[in-house]
């Protein structure tokens, strides 16, 4: 029998994150967003709630939960704000999970307890200025010089890379050549403050304005050879597995944004009057909101399916791509319709709907563009 009801622990987690998002995030996040300021107090609270350690083993300071728990938390946060949700998503799936999945025991002891409490944030340096979706075109290099790696190159659009609590960035770099002549790509941990590791000023972004994003550069940056994460030459395979998991998390975030648009429109349709009636009485508005609920529901089912396959240890690459594509489409369509329902007020940055509209577009780009998702789905179908 198929049963999508949540267990008691997942239900309790969802309720606690929902209460936090509505009572503590919603009243203040607009100010952070307009100032383009990182919400340190909210991140600290999320750390104390254990959200950054949800899928990390208890022996390493985590909550010992599963990846689906993280997805539930992301959905509830994104119903109110995506900047805080992406801070959590990147902090866990791109910051902590590579250490948990591929790190040695010393690396796990060093970083995971701090990551789980948000004492520090980790980032993942994959994308390069000239690479974009072609992650295999990595140009950043790391040369082994005695007992040190010497890194040179740059990374672009890296989340959580320049905050006051950023502890390190895990960097993909070319460390040699494979027998077939291809690039040998490895991942290396570069602690913040390492000489030669430079963080550029923050980007001026269309959305996610209360999150942290920078370009990074490495100029003869030296780190110990022990900072190699996992097996040398396995960096490309490592990041592919991390991205597949991350797409499920981004799908949950996109679902939250799509559902948040429904929440706001239901409230507004019950308050706003036009031509002598609440606008929710007009069939044109009813149908539009019904379509929005349909999209959000489909997106939720898609990421539930991908997450359940992941947790059962089954292949889920196609389902992750389907979920990410479905949710990003839902977020974009719902944000557009919500803005239309709100009219002029929807075009104002101080409204949640205005922020939703600005935040939705990046979901079609980050962690694999919609075009890349279609490529993956087609390949999984044997095309």
Image: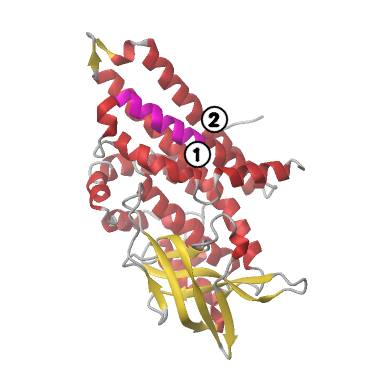
281 versus 288 height, above or below: above
Residue 57, visible in the rendered structure: no
Q: Is residue 202 left or right of residue 226?
A: left
Q: Measuring from the top left, give residue 115's x and y in whole percent.
A: 43, 64
The stretch in magenta equals 328-342
Residue at image location 49% in from the left, 63% down from the top: 124
Q: Earlier in the sequence, mark 1 or mark 2?
A: 2
For this orientation, the residue located farthest to the top is: 276
**Which residue has dot 1 on it?**
328
Instruction: Find residue 190 and report its horizontal and vertical position in percent.
Output: 47, 75
Q: Residue at 39% of width from left, 11% of height from top?
A: 283
Along the line of sight, the residue nearer the viewer: 128 or 254: 128
Q: Quadrant of the N terminus?
A: top right
User: What SS does tag 1 mark?
Assistant: helix
Instruction: Please tell me in which quadrant of the rendered image residue 82 appears.
Output: top left
The quarter of the picture where the C terminus appears is top right
Residue 312 visible from this viewpoint: yes
Residue farthest to the front, as pictured? 130
User: What residue is shown with label 2?
Assistant: 298
**Image-based side of 154 in relation to 354, left or right:** right
Q: Residue furthest bottom?
A: 146
- Secondary structure, mark 2, is helix
Q: What's the residue at 51%, 77% (across, down)? A: 152
Q: Is residue 273 magenta?
A: no
Pinpoint residue 244: horizontal percent, then vertical percent: 60, 51
Give the colouring mode of the picture: secondary structure
Q: Count neighbours of disc 2 (C-alpha within 10 A) and say few if under 14, some if 14 to 19, many if 20 or more.
A: some
SS majority, magenta: helix
Q: Nearer the viewer, mark 1 or mark 2?
A: 1
């Amino acid at each position: 029998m198929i049963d999508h009801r949540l267990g008691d622990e997942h239900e309790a987690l969802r309720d606690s994150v929902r209460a936090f998002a509505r009572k503590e995030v919603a009243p203040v996040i607009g100010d952070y967003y307009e100032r383009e300021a990182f919400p340190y107090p909210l991140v600290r609270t999320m750390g104390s709630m254990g959200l950054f350690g949800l899928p990390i083993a208890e022996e390493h300071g985590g909550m010992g939960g599963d990846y689906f728990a993280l997805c539930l938390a992301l959905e509830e946060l994104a119903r109110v704000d995506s900047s805080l949700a992406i801070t959590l998503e990147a902090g866990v799936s791109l910051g902590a999970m590579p250490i948990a999945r591929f790190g040695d025991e010393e690396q796990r002891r060093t970083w995971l307890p701090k990551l789980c409490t948000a004492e520090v944030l980790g980032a993942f340096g994959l994308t390069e200025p000239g690479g974009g979706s072609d992650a295999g075109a990595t140009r950043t290099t790391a040369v082994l010089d005695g007992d040190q790696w010497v890194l040179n190159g740059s990374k672009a659009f890296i989340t959580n890379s320049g905050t006051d609590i950023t502890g390190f960035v895990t960097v993909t770099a070319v460390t040699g050549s494979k027998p077939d002549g291809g690039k040998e790509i490895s991942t290396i941990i570069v602690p913040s403050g390492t000489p030669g590791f430079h963080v550029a000023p923050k980007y001026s972004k269309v959305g996610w304005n209360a999150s942290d994003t920078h370009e990074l550069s490495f100029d003869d940056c030296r780190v110990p050879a022990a900072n190699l994460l996992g097996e040398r030459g396995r960096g490309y395979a490592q990041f592919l597995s991390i991205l597949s998991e991350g797409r499920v998390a981004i799908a949950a975030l996109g679902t939250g944004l799509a559902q948040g648009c429904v929440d706001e429109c239901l409230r507004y349709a019950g308050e706003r009057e036009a031509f002598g009636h609440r606008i929710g009485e007009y069939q044109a508005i009813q149908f539009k909101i019904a379509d929005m609920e349909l999209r959000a529901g489909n997106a939720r089912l898609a990421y539930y399916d991908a997450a359940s396959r992941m947790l059962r240890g089954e292949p889920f690459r196609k389902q992750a791509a389907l979920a990410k594509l479905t949710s990003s489409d839902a977020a974009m369509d719902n944000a557009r319709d919500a803005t239309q329902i709100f009219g002029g007020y929807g075009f104002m940055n101080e409204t949640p709907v205005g922020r939703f509209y600005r935040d939705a577009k990046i979901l079609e780009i980050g962690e694999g563009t919609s075009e890349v998702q279609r490529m993956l789905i087609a390949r999984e179908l044997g095309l």
